[in-house]
Image (cartoon, rainbow, N blue to C red):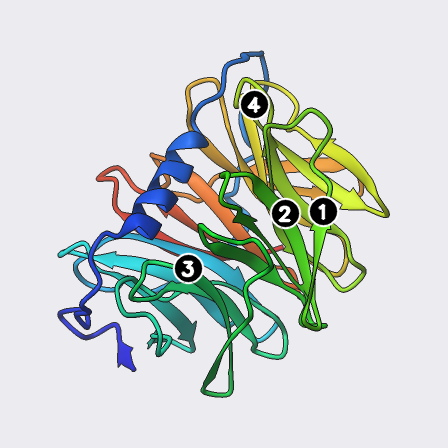
Amino acid sequence: MFNTSNRSLLRSRSRFTPLMLGLLCLLMLTTLAVPKAEAAPPASAASAKFTILPDVPNVLDSAALGINNRGQVVGILFDSDFNAHGFLYERGVYTILAAPGALVGPTFPVGINNQGQIVGSYQDSDFNVHTFVYEKGIYTTLPDPPGAVFGVFPNGINEKGQIIGTYQDENFQNYAYVYDKGVYVILPNVPGAALTIPSGINNSGQITGYFYDQDFTGYGFLYEKGVYTTLTVPGDAIATFSTAINNQGTVVGYYLDSAFNAHGLVYARGLYTTFDVPGAVFGTLVYGVSDSGNISGTYYDGDFLPHNFVLRL
């Protein structure tokens, strides 16, 4: 455990690995969009209640990926030596998370529910990626789904312990799944999609995420009772990425405008609200939302330095 007064990060043995490179490639893919349109700029965030989390010294990049009603935040950061560290942030203190089997890569927490259960992934000594659940100091590795060869990548967890994510088989075929009480249920792809990635699930079983069409343009979606609804921010959005959903059905995420700038988004009751964190120059990325109305994310300032934030809806 360490606080933000420390002058250096805990070092780990993990360097950039196939997992990290894959994640970086996925981030790069989110910029491969084509259509352009006219739109009004994002709504002003001047009156919004932003809390900027304390910066950890010597960090090259960071992401606040999940938040719960207690205000606990999970995410990942990269130190000045390009080592990646998963973290849990609570009441001003960052705690580094390290699954016992994570021997060649970082422990990558992606979501946290209101019980404090954290879901994430790690890479073992054979470069295989597995899912873990961390609760009350104990890491539990979940069984891989049948046919998974190139890793299992969870993206979120609800209060029932249901987990959503993706995995690939030996033919590099991608599968979206829901894991519930030891059973993997395969989700259908969005019709016509080249790739479907679920990123959040609530207690009602509503699932949000994003998909890429055959031109690899990104769109958000809401999946409920077997039906996909496409989510696209009106105006000049060239790509929309839905990343989380709470028990009120509020969806959050971000979109790219025609200049490839990223802006935060909230979708509730059929309406889109977009915003930028004050001081954001190179993008506002939103990753998590709690039932209490807190949003977690990351923005980049004029020096392209990352800062994690919490926004109160």
Q: Which residue is mark 3?
A: 129
Quadrant housing the N terminus: bottom left
Q: Give the image quarter of residue 81.
A: bottom left
Residue type at numbered disc 1: Leu
Gap between marks 2 and 4 measured at Cα: 25 Å
Mark 1 vs 3, N-terminal side: 3
For marks 2 and 4, the one nearer the N-term is 2
Q: Residue at x 51, y 47 (%)?
A: 286
Q: Nearer the viewer, residue 253 or 279?
A: 253
Relative placement, left or right, of 210 versus 280 is right
| The C terminus: image quadrant | bottom right
Secondary element under disc 1, as helix, strand or loop, is strand
Nearest to N terminus: mark 1 or mark 2: 2
Q: Secondary structure at mark 2?
A: strand
Mark number for residue 237? 4
* First of labels 1, 4 by sequence position: 1
User: Does residue 307 appear in the picture of this structure?
Assistant: yes
Height in image: 209 above or below 220?
below
Give the x, y percent position of residue 139.
Answer: 46, 80
Q: Which residue is mark 2?
A: 176
- Contact, mark 1 vs mark 3 (Cβ under 8 Å): no
Q: CA distance from mark 1 to mark 4?
A: 27 Å
Question: Dot 4 lies on which element?
Answer: loop
Q: Quadrant of residue 308?
A: bottom left
Q: Amino acid type of disc 2?
A: Ala
Q: Which residue is mark 1?
A: 187
Dot in front, 1 or 4: 1
| Tag 1 and tag 2, C-beta contact below 8 Å | yes
